Image (spheres, rainbow, N blue to C red):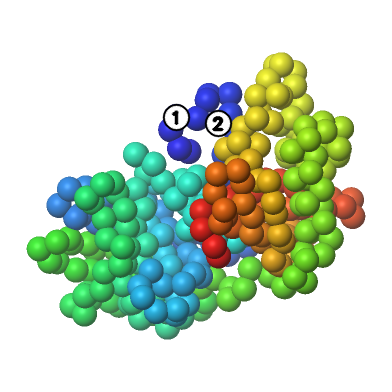
């Protein structure tokens, strides 16, 4: 969790938990040392994304950290790096992203530990790699010793699927309409309509905060910090995988003209309901 949020809202901002996937979670061990920070690695999480380099290539990004990941807390998100950087990485939990392809070939790394301590994208041909694809997983070791950094990392992660799920229509279909209804209810603070649009997990949080007399504070957090006071939203599509969906959108608020984001939804008793959303600055 990010530090500095009001204590009452820590639960609200925490990553959502779902059923654990069938594949064993990824693991990482070893060390990463850039001369300023040395990490004893404890966990790994793999996902697909565009390279941090200058090309448009899609790669497998393997996030490794000195803290363990909970895969189910990240699987609902489309922009996994943003979710990790926002909900996981902090002063205690540092993250390095290694880039690989489906065969296990090394394509570079990136990380940001703080001002003056990071690499937007680094590649060195002298990095040694024994990582290979074995039974649907990437297994092996990455190692490097240089003047700028050194690492020796043992990886074992599942090769992630190439798509989040089946594409939704451009308007987001039923999940898209449910999310827009949620936006309108949140903007108007229509509590009856809003409660009916939340999934079971979020309704439980509502009831907890309501019993403590803090539901208005929680809704303010959702509106200002999570929803970023969006005044305009245009759904651009999304994906569905069984009873979970992610809706993608562009938007703006009163102080930023170019925003994009995603909403996480669950289908419960045949109805699409909202778990939360995450907004990023800039055009997608």
Q: Which residue is mark 2?
A: 10
Q: Which residue is mark 1?
A: 4
36 sits left or right of 189 in the view: left
Which residue is farthest bottom?
A: 103
Of residues 283 and 48, the one nearer the viewer is 283
- Residue 131 lies, in percent from the top left, at 35, 76
> Quadrant location of the C terminus?
bottom right
Q: Residue at x 34, y 39 (%)?
A: 91
Q: Count residues near mark 2 (Cα–Cα under 10 Å), then give few for <14, some for 14-19, many for 20+.
A: some
- In this view of the protein, can residue 74 be seen by the observer? no
Of residues 166 and 33, the one nearer the viewer is 166
Q: Residue at x 47, y 64 (%)?
A: 46
* Res 43 quadrant in image: bottom left
**Please, is residue 25 above or below residue 115 in the view?**
below
Q: Secondary structure at mark 2?
A: helix
271 sits left or right of 203 in the view: right
């Amino acid at each position: 969790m990010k530090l500095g949020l009001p204590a009452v809202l820590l639960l609200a901002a925490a990553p959502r938990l779902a059923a654990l996937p069938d594949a064993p979670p990824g693991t990482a061990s070893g060390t990463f040392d850039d001369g300023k920070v040395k990490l004893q690695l404890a966990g790994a999480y793999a996902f697909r994304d565009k390279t941090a380099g200058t090309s448009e290539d899609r790669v497998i990004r393997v996030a490794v950290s000195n803290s363990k990941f909970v895969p189910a807390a990240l699987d609902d998100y489309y922009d996994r790096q943003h979710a990790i950087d926002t909900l996981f990485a902090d002063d205690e939990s540092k993250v390095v992203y290694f880039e690989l392809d489906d065969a296990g070939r090394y394509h570079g790394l990136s990380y940001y530990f703080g001002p003056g301590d990071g690499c937007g994208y680094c590649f060195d041909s002298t990095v040694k790699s024994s990582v290979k694809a074995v039974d649907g997983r990437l297994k092996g070791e990455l190692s490097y010793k240089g003047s700028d950094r050194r690492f020796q990392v043992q990886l074992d992660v599942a090769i992630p699927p190439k798509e989040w799920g089946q594409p939704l229509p451009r308007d987001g279909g039923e999940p898209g309409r449910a999310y827009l209804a949620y936006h309108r209810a949140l903007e108007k603070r229509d509590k009856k309509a809003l409660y009916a649009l939340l999934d079971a997990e979020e309704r439980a949080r509502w009831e907890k905060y309501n019993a403590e007399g803090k539901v208005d504070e929680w809704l303010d957090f959702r509106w200002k910090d999570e929803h970023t006071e969006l005044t305009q939203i245009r759904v651009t599509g999304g994906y569905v995988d069984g009873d979970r969906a992610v809706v993608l959108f562009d938007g703006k608020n009163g102080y930023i003209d170019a925003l994009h984001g995603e909403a996480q939804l669950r289908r419960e008793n045949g109805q699409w309901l909202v778990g939360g959303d995450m907004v990023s600055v800039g055009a997608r």
